[in-house]
Every structure is written in C-alpha cells, then in structure tokens.
C-alpha cells in the first residue's frame, strides 16, 4: 500500500495529443510525491453526460482522501465557473457544468464548494483555452498535498451547482418502463438507467423474459446471470458489474447489432404490462 496523495484524473482529452501528459507533468512538478490514477481520457469529446456517468462508476473505488480532477469542458474560456467540491471522502475539481454533480450526489452531497479563482494556485496562461493545465491541475495538486479548499477561492452555495444531465426511468400507466442507455462499453454491452430491484418490482424476474423495444425493433430478452448463459445471437438482460441492468450478447456487441448508443431510449415491457402504442401484454 502507498501513503502517497492520490489524484484521480478523468478527461475527454484522448491520448493522441499532449494534453494529458502536460497536465500530469504540471501536477508532478508542483507535487512530486503525487500518485496519479488515470480513470479514463477516452470520453467522447465535449460529452459532459458521459463524463459524469464515468465518474459515478469510478469514485466509489477511489481511496479516502483522493482528489478527482475531471475535465470535460466545452465551455472553456467562457464565464462558466471552475470549482472544487469537498465531499465526505475527498474532493472533486472541475468545471461547474454538470460533470461533477452525479458523483457529488453519490458521495453524500457537497460539504463545501469554492470557485477556483486564487491565482497563487494557477499557472500563467498563454491563452485561455487550456484550463485543465493552467487552473485545474494546479488546484488538484495543491488540494492533494494539504492546501485548504478555502485557499482556492470564495465559497459557493452548493445548491447553485449545475445539476447533472442524468435521466431517470419513467413508468407508464400500463407498467412498461421507459429507460435509457446510460453507457455502451467497449464490448458493446448497453448499461441502462435501471436497477434490478426496479424491474423486479414491476414483474420482471431472473430467468424470465422481458420485451425490449428499441426504436422500431422489438425483441424478447431473457434475464440471465452471466454472458455465457446467452444462446448464440440471443439478446439477454443481466446485472452488470455496477449493479445496473444491461442489454448484452454473448461475445458480440449488442450496441452494434441493435444500433444503440448512449442516450438512446429503450422500453422494457415486463410480463403482463402494456404499452400505449400496442395495448397488448408482452409475451
């Protein structure tokens, strides 16, 4: 185990350019004792929603006291705020554009929020468009090595943080569930914004089947325990490694097969439920 201070870094910078390496160099230049954990840098460019969901999946596994540096900042160089948010087990640093809000909620809510304005903890900026390097990376390094959050700038009302763009499932009058694809992983599994308890409460059950409506396509999906339980080309529903329901194929991409992307609507129709445009029970 290590007692080195940890900064966990997430961004949409990718690895083709030098952006990630430069931000890490800035932090290590200011605090050589840091250990930097790369959560991901392969988020879709400018996709605040995807970044917020990735943070939610990751923050629960970070060590106590870790500082999260999150940069998905399509409003860079505008009047949007850069903030540091103290939560029960650490601190999150990033733009106030909804990126941090889901993780803050998961970690029990904000204990303190400041706007990052103190130039003593910033680099001189040749231009205004690389806040990750010039403002956020120095702030993360400072917080990880003992600087008080209040030294970074003035307090902000936590209630004023921009909320995350994360949809919740909606239950229709007939018991059908209007869900959404939250995330497509690199294997093509499609995580939904729906937990197993919610589906069970509406009549779904492990080993049973649920009708799945994806645009104009209607399929029956069996609720299984593992990917290998699926028959060849069979669409299945399972509880993924984060405790959410996911649509999957065994050793193939459900996203590619059914044309699904993050944000797409998916309707689940448990046995006995009806949908407005059909009126008949799901098989």
Image: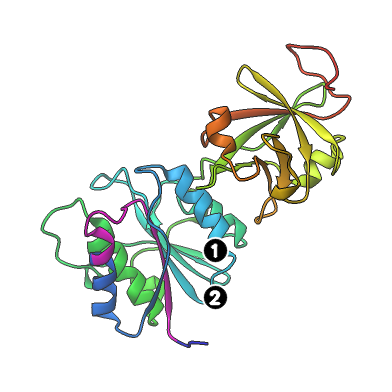
Query: In the image, which disc is placed on residue 63?
Result: 2
| Front-lying residue, 280 or 226 | 226
Q: In the image, residue 12 lies at what x, y percent?
A: 35, 51
Query: Going by the image, does 116 lie left or right of 127?
Result: right
Q: Is residue 274 magenta?
A: no
At label 2, counting other C-alpha atoms closer than 10 Å, the crowd grade (few under 14, some 14-19, many 20 or more) is some
Identify the element where label 2 is drawn. Answer: loop
Q: Which residue appears at 39% of the width and 44% of the height?
A: 44
Q: In the image, residue 165 lies at what x, y percent?
A: 51, 40
Toward which corner of the image does residue 216 lie, by quadrant?
Answer: top right
Toward which corner of the image does residue 64 lie, by quadrant?
Answer: bottom right
Q: Which residue is mark 1?
A: 59
Q: Which residue appears at 54% of the width and 47% of the height?
A: 187
Residue 256 in the image: above or below residue 189: above
Question: Which region shows up in magenta?
Answer: 4-21
Which residue, as the protein is rendered here, is positioned at the far front? 232
- Disc 2 to disc 1, how far (Cα)? 9 Å
């Amino acid at each position: 185990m290590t007692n080195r201070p940890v900064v966990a870094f997430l961004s949409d910078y990718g690895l083709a350019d030098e952006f990630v390496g430069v931000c890490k160099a800035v932090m290590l230049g200011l605090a050589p004792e840091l250990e930097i954990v790369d959560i991901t840098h392969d988020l879709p460019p400018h996709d605040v929603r995807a970044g917020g969901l990735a943070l939610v999946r990751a923050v629960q596994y970070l060590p106590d006291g870790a500082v999260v540096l999150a940069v998905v900042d399509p409003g860079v160089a505008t009047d949007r705020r850069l903030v540091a948010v103290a939560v029960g087990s650490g601190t999150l640093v990033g733009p106030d554009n909804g990126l941090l809000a889901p993780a803050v909620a998961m970690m029990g809510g904000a204990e303190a929020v400041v706007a990052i304005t103190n130039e003593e903890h910033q680099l001189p900026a040749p231009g205004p468009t690389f806040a990750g390097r010039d403002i956020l990376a120095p702030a993360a390094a400072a917080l990880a090595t003992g600087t008080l959050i209040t030294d970074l700038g003035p307090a902000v009302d936590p209630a004023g943080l921009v909320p995350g763009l994360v949809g919740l499932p909606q239950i229709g009058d007939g018991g059908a569930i209007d869900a959404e694809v939250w995330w497509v992983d690199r294997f093509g599994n499609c995580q939904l914004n729906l937990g197993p308890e919610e589906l069970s409460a509406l009549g779904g059950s492990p080993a049973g089947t649920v009708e799945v409506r994806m645009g104009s396509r209607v399929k029956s999906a069996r609720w299984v325990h593992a990917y290998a339980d699926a028959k060849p080309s069979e669409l299945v529903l399972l509880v993924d490694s984060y405790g959410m329901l996911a649509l999957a194929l065994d050793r193939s991409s459900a996203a590619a097969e059914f044309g699904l992307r993050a944000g797409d609507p998916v309707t689940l129709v448990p046995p006995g439920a009806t949908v407005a445009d059909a009126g008949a029970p799901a098989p």
